[in-house]
Image (cartoon, rainbow, N blue to C red):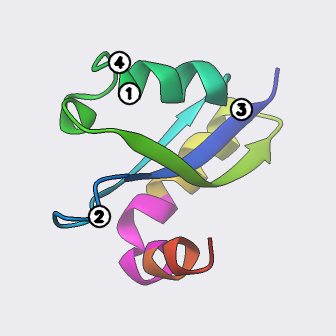
Amino acid sequence: MPYFVYLIVNEDKSKKRFSYVGYTGDIKKRLNLHNLGKGAKFTRGKKWKLVYYERYDSKSDAMKNEYRLKKDYKLRKKLINNK
């Protein structure tokens, strides 16, 4: 089963722009849960747009790279600006 590390940003451009990094086995389903308010607590109450994802063959590789992307703010900013 493939796993994905994803980066989403809130769609409301009038407010401060927030981003969120996570991993999942089904990107479409996970993004839908975030937008329905049933995702991570941080993402509730906002509308989200997928800006980046990577595919991995193992869950452990996805989790390692999710952690790396969560800690690397410069890389996140670069990925958001390249969308």
Is 34 located above or below residue 33 in the figure?
below
| 73 within the magenta span | yes
Contact (Cβ within 8 Å) of mark 1 with mark 3: no
Measure the C-alpha gap from mark 3 to mark 4: 22 Å
**Residue 60 in picture, x, y percent from top left:** 64, 37
Residue beneath disc 4 = 36
Question: In this rendering, which labeled residue sits more in front, label 2 or label 3?
Answer: 2
Q: Which mark is residue 3?
A: 3
Q: Which residue is mark 2?
A: 13
Which of the marked residues, 4 or 2, is nearer the chain's N terminus?
2
Q: Is residue 68 left or right of residue 82?
A: left
- Mark earlier in primary sequence (2, 3): 3
Q: How many marks?
A: 4
Q: In terms of image quadrants, where is residue 79?
A: bottom right
> What's the amino acid at mark 3?
Tyr
Name the residue tied to disc 1: 35
Say which label, 1 or 3, has the lower sequence index. 3
**Residue range (magenta):** 68-76
